[in-house]
């Protein structure tokens, strides 16, 4: 089990406080949660809910697929290599939200107002509907409903030994960091160097939050995160970038 360096302190942008202050810290040595749910029940719940979700959302998938296909050239689905459990690469699925000639460029982040995003893509991103095809990733076992969001290889290559702990679990469609940074594109749009800000400020915070999540994986916590994720997709955000309290 990977251990955190003693005395290590991470200070990062905390979107929970509503004013962009530096607040989130950790001095703990994380370890993966144990127990029946973490070891067995979580995967069973993932498979059941993802399968039901795919069946129930099939009409919506068809509608979105038609909109994507009819409004811009290119495939309906966008595939990108991400790093999953135990460092194994896999292809994450999304509804394509960018122009084909630009979505294939080696750019790992997107900021608000990015001209690469299509009109339908902006709508899909607003409600996180572009992530729905990842239910198939969950069924296949590449992902979980809740778990650390998978990153692209270029970022994972820069993880410290301690940060690589997040690779011990299946990556998820949503996680605590996704809730804290659900207006991430707006945050990045305000930075002079979005790429550097993401690498040095946001990503370390996400990894710290997800390491904390992995220490106490419970059914109640996963349900809470799933419900908050669904609700947050439909709550209006203020222009200041702060989030409405759930």
Image (cartoon, helix red, strand yellow):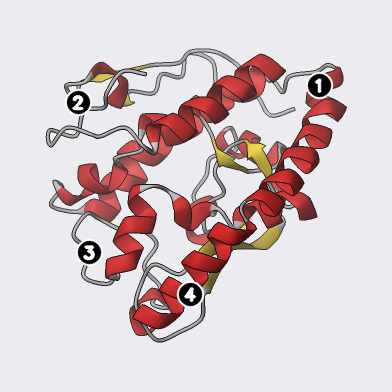
SS state under label 1: helix
In 3D space, how far apart are the residues under numbered discs 1 and 2 (Cα atoms)? Answer: 35 Å
Residue 218 visible in the displayed image: no
Residue that numbered label 2 is attached to: 20
| Mark carried by residue 37 | 1
Q: Are marks 4 and 2 in contact (CB under 8 Å)?
A: no
Q: In this view, does 118 lie above or below 176?
A: below
| Mark carried by residue 66 | 4
In 3D space, how far apart are the residues under numbered discs 1 and 4 (Cα atoms)? Answer: 39 Å
Depth-wise, is mark 2 or mark 3 nearer the camera?
Answer: 3
Q: Are marks 3 and 1 in contact (CB under 8 Å)?
A: no
Mark with earlier residue (1, 2): 2
Mark with earlier residue (3, 1): 1
Depth-wise, is mark 4 or mark 2 nearer the camera?
Answer: 4
Mark with earlier residue (1, 4): 1
Residue that numbered label 3 is attached to: 114
């Amino acid at each position: 089990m990977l251990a955190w360096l003693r005395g290590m302190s991470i200070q990062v942008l905390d979107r929970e406080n509503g004013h962009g202050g530096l607040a989130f810290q950790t001095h703990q040595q994380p370890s993966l949660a144990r127990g029946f749910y973490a070891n067995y029940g979580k995967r069973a719940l993932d498979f059941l809910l993802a399968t039901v979700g795919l069946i129930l959302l099939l009409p919506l998938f068809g509608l979105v697929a038609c909109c994507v296909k009819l409004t811009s050239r290119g495939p309906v689905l966008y595939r990108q290599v991400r790093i999953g459990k135990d460092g194994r690469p896999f292809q994450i699925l999304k509804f394509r939200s960018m122009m084909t000639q630009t979505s294939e460029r080696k750019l790992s982040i997107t900021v608000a107002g990015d001209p690469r995003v299509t009109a339908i893509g902006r709508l899909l991103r607003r409600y996180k509907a572009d992530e729905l095809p990842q239910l198939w990733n969950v069924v296949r076992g590449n992902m979980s409903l809740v778990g650390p969001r998978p990153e692209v290889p270029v970022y994972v290559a820069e993880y410290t030994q301690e940060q690589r702990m997040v690779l011990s679990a299946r990556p998820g469609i949503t996680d605590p960091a996704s809730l804290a940074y659900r207006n991430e594109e707006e945050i990045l749009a305000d930075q002079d160097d979005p790429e550097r800000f993401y690498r040095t400020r946001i990503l370390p915070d996400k990894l710290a939050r997800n390491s904390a999540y992995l220490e106490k994986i419970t059914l109640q916590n996963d349900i809470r995160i799933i419900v908050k994720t669904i609700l947050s997709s439909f709550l209006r955000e203020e222009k200041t970038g702060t989030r409405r309290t759930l």
